[in-house]
Amino acid sequence: MSGHEPAEGRAKGELAAEVLAVLHAAAPAELTPGEVLDGLADTRLAYTTVVTTLTRLHDKGVLRRTKRGRAYAYAPVADESGLAARRMRKVLDGRSDREAVLAHFVDELSDDDEELLRRLLDLGQ
């Protein structure tokens, strides 16, 4: 494999998750694509692959970017728990029977998580 090909066998979304992990570890600092590439474990990735991944995450609203020299520097728009909540909301928004989705979600929670959810909901009243 040359130094300009993405790693084979990478699961869809795996690189994006790794890029986000690098950015979260650096937060609140913003990183350029080269700095993100330096922080990734896979040294076989091409710079352009990282740029493409960062651009897609920015287009999805997951990252913010600012101009730094000739490149952009990127940072997450939310912390990891905020991103997880955003993904959960997106799944819920994509279903027509929200009540059924939420009921199944609650049924799958551990007793401790269900109690935590009840406490959080009680705080909102």
Image: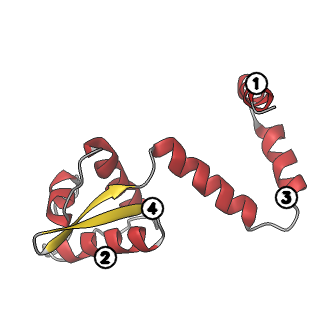
Q: Which mark is residue 62?
A: 4
The CA distance from mark 3 to mark 1 is 21 Å
Q: Is residue 21 above or below residue 68?
A: above
Residue for badge 3: 98
Q: Earlier in the sequence, mark 4 or mark 3?
A: 4
**Number of the front mark, 3 or 1:** 1
Identity of the residue drawn at 23% across and 48% down: 29
Identity of the residue drawn at 87% across and 46% down: 103
Secondary structure beneath dot 2 equals helix
Marks 1/2 in contact by CB < 8 Å: the verdict is no
Marks 4/3 in contact by CB < 8 Å: the verdict is no
Identity of the residue drawn at 16% across and 77% down: 4
Q: Is residue 106 above or below residue 46?
A: above
Q: Left of 78 or right of it: where is 28?
A: left
Q: Left of 5 or right of it: where is 109?
A: right
Residue for badge 2: 52
The CA distance from mark 3 to mark 2 is 34 Å
